[in-house]
């Protein structure tokens, strides 16, 4: 079949995806996150890393990536090239690395080139890596890299890759249980965990020695907040299901308000608990694709249940979606891409994403965007429930067969 090999169509997709990313990096401004990063980087240059953490409570990224971004700002000042270009270009390159790793991981399947091509050309991957202006794309890259290295029985390198990811952003820790359970033998698992921890901590020196408290307060204790407009329009999360799909808040019976508030406050802990359960139930899946699928489902559960999840966090697991069945990733990628692109179009005022991305200035969203948001969230929520219940059912059947 034409799509089972890398023919003209594949290289056309690669060139097109690269061209769109270059356009976004060079000509667009990015979201408000790009502005925040420039402010943080300027603060690091002027006050030092510790001073920046003390002055700016919103500086919640690890010291390593903060120092790197400060160096890029210094380079921007010296060359006159806008900082937004230096900020986004490295993560667009990591996105190319994700496409390459997908090619490697899907090599034994007929969807090798289709999967990598669909990822590389998906608007969601393009926007989050080359337009948005944050570091979340690095999480997906390092998770894929760790999965691939484990598939090659390179445990030390896999642990090092995951540890390095913690120098950039912390959500990679959510994949540690699945990766550790993939390693055979408890002694090797403990070595794997120790190596991840050692490499991870190295990236926080010498700042950690100078002021461990401020590192804990700004970085480790940071909790994402629900992102919503000034009129209460939520970007994502259980509020979409509870208050938009089912009923508006004022229509819920009084008796349900306390449980709903509890769920919204503790959804991420519930999601984390269920993700740990899923990692344990899928511990016998021994292929790299199945390992990547386990990690993808874990993030899917967190994504569906956490009230602090926002659209840029899709980048944490987006490459891993393509290791799941097509019945999930095809509608998930389509709807999430349609939602994010149409929203950014609305916030920028044009389909080329030129001009200022103005979230605060658009408190009310068109019904079309809300419909797409609701549909996308429902796909994620229902899929998360389905994957979890399926694994519980299969575990029960395995137990029944073992008894017989």
Image: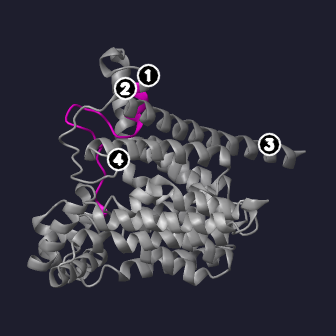
Q: Nearer the viewer, residue 352 or 288?
A: 352
Label 4, label 3: how far apart the Cα atoms are:
50 Å
Name the residue: 75% across, 44% down: 394
Q: Position of residue 1 (x, y in %)?
A: 79, 59
Q: Is residue 67 inside the magenta stretch?
A: no
Whether tag 1 and tag 2 are in contact, CB under 8 A, the answer is yes
Residue sticking out furthest to the right: 404
Label 1, label 4: how far apart the Cα atoms are:
31 Å
Looking at the image, residue 187 sits to the left or right of residue 317; the answer is: right
Dot 3 lies on which element? helix
Dot 2 lies on which element? helix
Of labels 1 and 4, earlier in sequence is 1
Q: Position of residue 172 (x, y in %)?
A: 46, 65
Magenta stretch, main secondary structure, is: loop
Q: Position of residue 111 (x, y in %)?
A: 71, 59
Residue 397, label in figure: 3
Residue 363 visible: yes
Residue 62 visible: no
For disc 4, the marked residue is 351
**Boundaries of the magenta span:** 220-244
For disc 1, the marked residue is 246
Name the residue: 66% across, 48% down: 326
Circle 3 Cα neighbour tier, 10 Å, few/some/many (<14 / 14–19 / ≥20): few
Q: Where 161 falls versus 53 (above or below)? A: below
**Residue 38 picture quarter:** bottom left
Whether tag 4 and tag 3 are in contact, CB under 8 A, the answer is no
Whether tag 3 and tag 1 are in contact, CB under 8 A, the answer is no
For disc 2, the marked residue is 243
Looking at the image, residue 109 sits to the left or right of residue 261; the answer is: right
């Amino acid at each position: 079949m034409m799509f089972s090999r890398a023919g003209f169509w594949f290289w056309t997709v690669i060139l097109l995806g690269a061209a769109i990313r270059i356009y976004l990096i060079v000509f667009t401004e990015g979201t408000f996150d790009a502005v925040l990063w420039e402010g943080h980087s300027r603060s690091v240059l002027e006050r030092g890393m510790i001073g920046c953490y003390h002055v700016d409570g919103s500086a919640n990224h690890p010291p390593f990536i903060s120092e790197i971004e400060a160096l890029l700002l210094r380079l921007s000042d010296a060359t006159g090239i806008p900082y937004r270009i230096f900020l986004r270009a490295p993560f667009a390159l990591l996105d190319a690395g994700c496409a390459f790793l997908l090619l490697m991981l899907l090599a034994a399947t007929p969807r090798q080139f289709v999967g990598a091509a669909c990822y590389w050309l998906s608007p969601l991957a393009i926007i989050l890596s080359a337009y948005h202006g944050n570091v979340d794309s690095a999480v997906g890259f390092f998770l894929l890299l760790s999965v691939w290295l484990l598939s090659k029985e390179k445990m030390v390198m896999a642990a090092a890759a995951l540890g390095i990811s913690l120098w950039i952003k912390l959500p990679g820790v959510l994949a540690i249980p699945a990766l550790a359970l993939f390693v055979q033998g408890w002694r090797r698992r403990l070595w794997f965990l120790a190596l991840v921890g050692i490499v991870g901590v190295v990236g926080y020196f010498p700042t950690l020695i100078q002021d461990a408290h401020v590192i804990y307060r700004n970085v480790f204790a940071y909790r994402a907040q629900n992102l919503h407009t000034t009129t209460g329009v939520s970007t994502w999360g259980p509020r979409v299901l509870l208050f938009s799909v089912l009923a508006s808040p004022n229509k819920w019976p009084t008796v349900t308000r306390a449980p709903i508030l509890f769920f919204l406050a503790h959804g991420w802990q519930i999601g984390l608990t269920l993700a740990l359960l899923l990692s344990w139930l899928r511990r016998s899946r021994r292929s790299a694709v199945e390992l990547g699928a386990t990690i993808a489902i874990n993030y899917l559960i967190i994504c569906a249940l956490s009230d602090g999840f926002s659209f840029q966090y899709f980048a944490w697991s987006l490459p891993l979606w393509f290791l799941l069945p097509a019945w999930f990733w095809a509608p998930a990628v389509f709807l999430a891409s349609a939602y994010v692109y149409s929203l950014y179009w609305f916030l920028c005022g044009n389909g080329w994403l030129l001009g200022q991305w103005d979230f605060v200035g658009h408190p009310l969203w068109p019904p079309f965007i809300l419909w797409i948001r609701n549909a996308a969230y429902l796909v994620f929520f229902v899929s998360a429930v389905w994957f979890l219940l399926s694994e519980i059912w299969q575990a029960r059947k395995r137990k029944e067969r073992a008894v017989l």
